[in-house]
Image (tube, rainbow, N blue to C red):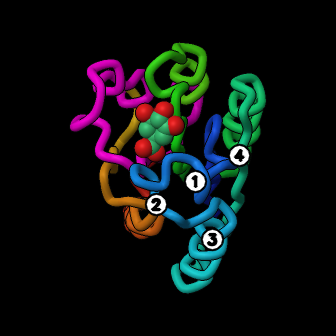
Amino acid sequence: MSRLVTILNGPNLNLLGKRQPEIYGRDTLADIENACRTLGKQLKLDISFQQSNREYELIDWIHEAREKAAAIVINPAAFTHTSVALLDALNTFEGWVIEVHISQVHKREAFRHHSYVSHRADAVMAGFGVHGYELALRHAAHLIGLKKK
Ligand code: DQA
């Protein structure tokens, strides 16, 4: 059985560390990737970690995950609030889906309160800072262990 977790990051997350640090903190995406890979080893998960500013690329990676991943951890960034296409792609994926937001989106502007991706996500993390990725990975390991999907 697959223990691959595909971690996907949406637009502007390549600028983490420089982008609005008062909201998103000083850690870079590379820091998050390192933390996920280290934890992935401990949890005996295979990790794939990708970021794109292009909606179609994220959709293509979700399609690839259909063939091989047990879970997707996704921070769709601004596409969270706009993309029916990402939701449709995630609806074709049969494994676990965990949605992650670094910031507590419900405390922010009203347009960030709705998530298309949440219509599909099995779990949603928001406001845990970059630590949310590690929490999501731990939960993914737990869900994969349940072997229900
Ligand atoms: C975000 C929240 C989104 O509203 C925003 O567009 C992002 C990042 C977060 O991680 O807090 O780019 O997904």
Q: Are marks 1 and 2 in contact (CB under 8 Å)?
A: no
Q: Mark 4 points at which residue?
A: 51
Regarding mark 2 in the picture, which secondary structure is present there? loop
Query: Is disc 2 surrounded by few (<14), some (14 to 19) or many (20+) residues within 10 Å?
Result: some
- Mark closest to the chain's N terminus, 4 or 1: 4
Q: Which residue appears at 33% of the width and 59% of the height?
A: 128
Query: Is disc 3 surrounded by few (<14), some (14 to 19) or many (20+) residues within 10 Å?
Result: some
Q: Name the residue under label 2.
A: 25
Q: Distance between the residues labelled 4 and 1?
A: 19 Å
Give the amino acid type for the residue marked by disc 1 in the picture. Answer: Ala
Give the amino acid type for the residue marked by disc 3 in the picture. Answer: Asp
58 left or right, relative to 133: right
* Residue 2 circle label: none
Front residue of 132/88: it is 132
* Residue 70 circle label: 1
Relative to 22, say whether 119 is above or below: above
76 left or right, relative to 148: right
Q: Mark 3 points at which residue?
A: 31
Query: Is disc 1 surrounded by few (<14), some (14 to 19) or many (20+) residues within 10 Å?
Result: many
- Mark closest to the chain's N terminus, 2 or 3: 2
Q: Which residue appears at 52% of the width and 64% of the height?
A: 26
Relative to 117, say whether 50 is above or below: below
Regarding mark 4 in the picture, which secondary structure is present there? strand
Q: How far apart are marks 2 and 3 (CA)?
A: 12 Å
Give the amino acid type for the residue marked by disc 2 in the picture. Answer: Gly
Q: Distance between the residues labelled 4 and 3?
A: 13 Å
| Picture coordinates of residue 17, whole percent (x, y) | 59, 59
**Is residue 61 visible to the viewer in this orientation of the structure?**
yes
